[in-house]
Image (tube, rainbow, N blue to C red):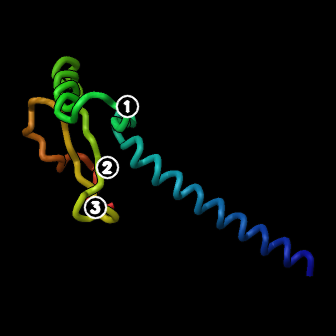
Amino acid sequence: MINKLYYLMAGLIAVLCAMIAALYTLTEDTSFPLNTNYAVSVSSGESKLSKTELIEHFNSFVSEHDVEVYKVAADQANFIGGRNLFYFGDDHSDDGSRLDWFNPGL
């Protein structure tokens, strides 16, 4: 009887570990997308700059350093199930379709 209890507990622990690993992988995929060199998280809540000024700074940073900067934000119309993609810089020819890691429905 004790052996069956041990096997049951070991099985439950294995399932729990698998679930945690899956959630960790999902979080890492959205935090640090595939084929990217860097990923950062920026909070502008305490900034004394206006949104327009912040956008201007990001645009100039992208232009000066020849990098791609994207911001993923919750969709205001569908806060739980939708995401929007914003990109910075002067070249707005990219519609985001080549970004395999971005899924607007997550």
Crowding at label 3, few (<14), some or many (≥20) Cα neighbours within 10 Å?
some
Q: Nearer the viewer, mark 3 or mark 1?
A: 3
Task: Calculate the distance from the C-alpha at mark 1 to the C-alpha at mark 2.
Answer: 14 Å
Q: How many marks?
A: 3
Q: Is residue 75 left or right of residue 91?
A: right
Q: Nearer the viewer, residue 104 or 76?
A: 76
Disc with the residue nearer the chain's start (3 vs 2): 3
Name the amino acid type tagged 2: Trp
For the N terminus, give its image quadrant.
bottom right
Q: Amino acid at mark 1?
A: Tyr
Q: Secondary structure at mark 3?
A: loop
Name the foreground residue: 39 vs 76: 76
- Is the C-beta separation of discs 1 and 2 under 8 Å? no
Instruction: Give the CA distance from mark 3 to mark 2.
Output: 14 Å
Residue 2 rendering spot, x and y as whole percentages: 92, 76
On residue 82, which mark appears? 3
Q: Position of residue 21 (x, y in %)?
A: 58, 55
* Circle nearer the N terminus (1, 2): 1
Query: Residue beneath label 1, please?
Result: 38
Expressed as whole percent of the image width and height from the top left, the position of residue 48 reads: 30, 28
Q: Residue at label 2?
A: 101
In front of the other: 69 or 34: 69
Q: Residues within 10 Å of mark 2 (few under 14, many from 20)?
A: some
